[in-house]
Image (cartoon, rainbow, N blue to C red):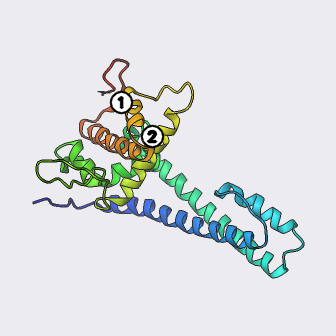
Amino acid sequence: MHFVPAKSLSQQAQGMVLKVRDTLIGQRTLLVNTLRGHASEFGVVAGKGVGRVGSLLAAIEQDATIPAEARDMIALLGQQIEHLDIKIKALEARLNAAHKANAVSRRLATIPGLGPVTALTLATEIDPAAFASGRHMAAWIGLTPKEHSTGGKQRLVGISRAGNERLRSLLVVCATSVIKAATMPASKQMTGWLRGLLQRKPRKVAAVALANKIARVAWAVMTYGTVYRRCPTNVEVSYAA
């Protein structure tokens, strides 16, 4: 039988800060998309992203053909987005402070692609002693393909929705950022394993495979109390205390 370890009150509180941040980011994304949609109805189009909101609001304010009622509603949406920006930045400052105070989170942040939020999430929500190996932890997160094998023929398909959805999403985002950085000209992050994977598989499939590998490395870092160090030899990963 597999038992779920009980979290301490501090772990629950830290996890709540992470989840509230995700909720506020989702609300901000919803408001930004609403703002862009209403603005496009009046012929004002802007690119995606929170960074384009300021220029979009300025363009709407300068357009005299837009009715005053519409400009007032768009200004209200802009105020709500700004309010959420302030709250999110305050939470991120608190998370950065918690990350610096957490020794496990600092060690996890040495892994390429892992930022303070993902490292702190792993340190807060994962008990490495609950898994026999990094492979088991990656499977628990949901980063392994489903298997539909029959008649002695192995057939693997994509990953399912089983597992820890939040951790899986964070690790895939981290892997995507590593792949993006590795494919830049003169990048030193490209390894032979990743290069071969990108040649055989689509980028999104490679991102999931790399996320699986990151999860295994994270388990080793938490279990052995080490930091990540890329070995200059043919061995891609080694650990140092």
Residue found 90% across the figure and 72% down from its top: 64
Q: Amino acid at mark 2?
A: Gly
Q: Position of residue 146 (x, y in %)?
A: 25, 55
- When asked about the image quadrant of residue 55, the answer is bottom right
Q: Which mark is residue 156?
A: none
Mark 1 residue type: Trp
The answer to which of 162 and 1 lies nearer the viewer is 162
Label count reads 2
Sort mark 2 into few (<14), some (14-19) or many (20+) by Cα contacts within 10 Å: many
Real-space CA distance between mark 2 and mark 1, rounded to the nearest whole angstrom: 16 Å
Q: Secondary structure at mark 2?
A: loop
Q: Which mark is residue 193?
A: 1
Q: Secondary structure at mark 1?
A: helix
User: In the picture shown, does residue 71 fall above or below 53?
Assistant: below
Q: Nearer the viewer, residue 55 or 152?
A: 152
Instruction: Answer with left or right where residue 84 lies relative to residue 135.
Output: right
Q: Is residue 119 above or below residue 197?
A: below
Q: Quadrant of residue 14?
A: bottom left
The residue under the point 14% across, 54% down is: 150
The structure residue drawn at horizontal position 62% and vertical position 70%, both measured from the top left corner, is 31
Q: Is residue 111 among the parts visible in the rendering?
A: no
Q: Is residue 196 left or right of residue 126?
A: right
Report which quarter residue 166 is drawn in: bottom left
Disc 2: which residue: 113
Report x, y in % for residue 222. 28, 41
Q: Is residue 10 left or right of residue 35?
A: left
Q: Quadrant of the C terminus?
A: top left
Nearer the N terminus, badge 2 or badge 1? 2
Front residue of this view, candidates 159 and 142:
159
